[in-house]
Image (cartoon, rainbow, N blue to C red):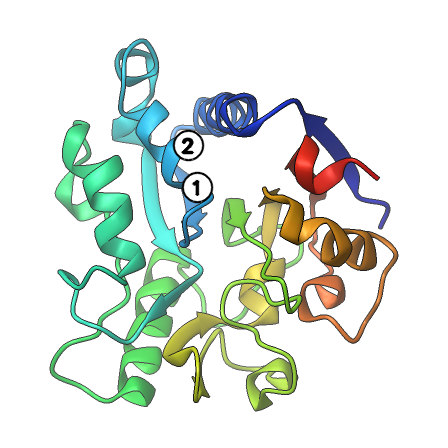
Amino acid sequence: MTPNLEVLPDLDALAARAADLIMGISKAKPRVAIALSGGSTPRPIYRLLASPPRLEAFPWAQVHWFWGDERFVPPDDPASNYRMAREEMLARAPVPADHIHPMPTVGLSPEAAAVAYERTLREFYGADSLATERPLFDLNLLGLGTNGHTASLFPGMPVLEERQRWVGTMHDPQAGTRITLTYPALESSRETVFVVAGAEKKTVLRKVLDGDRALPAARLRPQGSLRFLADRAAGSE
């Protein structure tokens, strides 16, 4: 698959482009499933969606929100991807409570949490196996780490080889314990969009676009369209 790269002038333009793209996808069907990315880059995107004029125009009642990965911390922890999305968007918009599907991180082990979230995904999808003609997500919004990771698929981790489970765990001394969608779930999407910002991402973005399979992000093979949105600092080459 040949990815589509779009370079925007700055982070503000990148956030606005991504927000409008999310809105367009969300209006396409009566029921839409979106997997959100964590980290700092999507924060202004979520803020724009929950601010006028997009706040009033967005079809909030049609969209179900999932997460591509989560740090194994309580939902009110500053490092929580769920907390960031809640504060910037979900708590500021008329989102039905049963349309928000965070990864569980309290009262169970990481492995049990992965099993529980996979159960949530299967119940939403309505089947125990993913069909190519019916993707799990309408949009998978992803970030890109300087080490080439996406979601919490880090280089060298056993979860990279998982092909049956939809959700797995990742343990790293520096990054901590995380729950992450595996390649089968991440790839089951009509549209996959990487959002990349900052000069420190320039080299890794080039390697991913060149197909360097040593990088987890470059090994992703989505069923639908694949595009990269980058600010000029990351995509200038």
Residue 192: in sight, yes or no? no
Q: Quadrant of the C terminus?
A: top right
User: In this rendering, is residue 119 above or below 30?
Assistant: below
Q: In the shown orientation, is residue 67 left or right of residue 90?
A: right
Residue 34: in sight, yes or no? yes
Q: Are marks 1 and 2 in contact (CB under 8 Å)?
A: yes
User: Quick one: label 2, few (<14), some, or many (20+) residues within 10 Å?
Assistant: many
Res 27 → quadrant:
top left
- The label on residue 52 is none
Q: Amino acid at mark 2?
A: Ile
- Determine which residue is flagged by label 1: 42
Distance between the Cα atoms at labels 1 and 2? 5 Å
Instruction: Residue 48: give x, y in percent of width and height.
Output: 35, 24
User: In this rendering, is residue 213 above or below 113?
Assistant: above
- Determine which residue is flagged by label 2: 45
Q: Of helix, strand and loop, which one carries label 2?
A: helix
